[in-house]
Amino acid sequence: MDDPHVAPNVSRAEIAVAASAGVAGVSGSFAVAGRTPEFVVAPVSALVVGLAPGAVMTAAIRNLGDAGHLLALGVAAVLAVGVLAGIAFAGIRLGARSEVPYTSVAVGGVGSWLLAVVATGAPEQSLATAGPIAATLAVAERGWAVGRESRGARVSSSRRKVLGAVGSLVGFAGFAAYRGASITGVEPGPISTVTDDETHAEADRLLSRADDRSFDVADLSGLVTPTDEFYEVDIDNVNPNPSDDKWGLSVTGEVEQEVSVDFEELSGMEAVENRLVTLRCVGESLNGHKIDTAVWTGVPTSELLDEARPQGSDACCVLVRAVDGYYQEFPLSALEDSFLAFGMNGRRLPRGHGYPVRLLVPGHWGEINVKWIDEIEVLADEQKGYWEKRGWHGTGPVNTVAKLHAVNRLDSGSGERVQVAGHAYAGTRGIERVEVSTDGGESWDEATLSEPLPGDDVWRQWRYEWDAEPGEHEVVVRATDGEGDLQPRAFSQPYPSGATGWVSRTVEA
Ligand SMILES: Nc1nc2c(c(=O)[nH]1)N[C@H]1C(S)=C(S)[C@@H](COP(=O)(O)O)O[C@H]1N2
Ligand SMILES: [Mo]
């Protein structure tokens, strides 16, 4: 039965057992850890992301979103199965040469456990990787022992055993997928679990104010984005899952005094407040949807900076680091009005948006709004951040944009009344005016803007209606920011400095 293509004395059965052990190990790990950093595939995935060229990463994150993350995680899972199968195989081979019973089980079990501990740093959860591998090897070794004793046993009985083994493995993997999918990591409770009720009440007031001022337009999202619809951009396929008591933030580098806070100290500060802030990703397409707004609860970063006292002329900029290995560099001045948020829309930050604490830098592209923040290093010399090393220029203020997301036909008896609407955003410059053309840019009319919301970094909604002649109309939208600057007409792709141009769309009346 030996396969001529594999090394002498290595049987297909051994390879099949090793591969099964690998699948069982990854399954067991997922059943216990789910999509958290303790999942044995997570470090493999981080390695893959680290090695991937910037262009590939950018394309995957921009075009595939979470599907891209799942795809990459799938590739990493296959690699992890391979590595664990390798350990199991080493166990089987050593076992074949050893007189000591269950050598394969010991080698495969202990070896995979050690590797999982080194990779994830989680000794207990790593048992869920090693256990199923050891069990698979034990079943196989027992089967081989029995097989040797009763040579010539009927083939049908061994086929039945193989089918049974495959069935158990598939069943176990299915159970693991189901179990692991329900593990979400830290769950955000209401903000009042860490602040006083007044802070919570204030967040609720801002939420209802935003609700009141949002247009009632079909297909147009409100002025505040519900947390589970808020866009998300992550470099990793598995988000960190930190706990409050393990978290800490320090201000280091060119400062007179290094400062560190833990979560209790930060959330217990007098200065806790709520802010409405819009975020926009530099990688989003011109009329894309990677732009959203929330009510954030937190503390001005100046509370820590004032204590640390960056050293005057020596300090040009900051390098902000995060738990997931992400880092961004930008001018110290941008940090002045920034905010350390631990709440989002009246609840603790969800894991995907930076639990326990993230940075919000008013008016700047999303990428420097570092999630899972744990260090602010004040620098004397400029450096490149994570995305800047990959060619992006996304640490500065956002470009002005007017989106066109809703087109509705209003029933008005005679003729076609058409409504178009969207959001407009210019960071801290604010939006002064949005204009709409229904003839491809020949003539312009002013759109109605939503009432401004408190805060100096909040988008606005616009809407416009007209009686349209039957046929096609080229609708174009453009915004003017609070400094009186009309957004540039010239179109450019998001890479490397953010999309520019006027959004246009053909509307059928
Ligand atoms: N630690 C960390 N912070 C991060 C990122 C990340 O991958 N890791 N992505 C950045 C990017 S590119 C953007 S656009 C915003 C998105 O924030 P959100 O996912 O909460 O919408 O977070 C930024 N902060
Ligand atoms: Mo981004």
Image: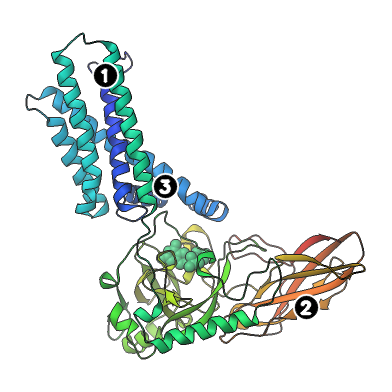
Element assignment for label 2: loop
Q: Position of residue 285 (x, y in %)?
A: 63, 60
Q: Residue at x 29, y 28 (%)?
A: 165
What residue is disc 2 on? Answer: 447
Q: Residues within 10 Å of mark 3 (few under 14, many from 20)?
A: many
Residue 1 seen in render: no
Q: Is residue 365 above or below residue 91?
A: below
Task: Look at label 3 and name its amino acid.
Answer: Leu
Residue at image point 53% right, 54% down: 65
Q: Quadrant of residue 342?
A: bottom left
Question: In front: 335, or 60?
Answer: 60
- In the rendered image, the vertical position of residue 235 relative to residue 487, given as above or below: above
Quarter of the rendering containing residue 175: top left
Q: Are marks 1 and 3 in contact (CB under 8 Å)?
A: no
Gap in angstroms between the C-alphas marked 2 and 1: 74 Å
Under 8 Å from ligand 1: the CB of mark 3? no
Check disc 1 and report the residue beneath it.
11
Whether label 1 lies within 8 Å of ligand 1 gets the answer no
Residue beneath disc 3 = 73
Closer to the chain start, of discs 1 and 3, is: 1
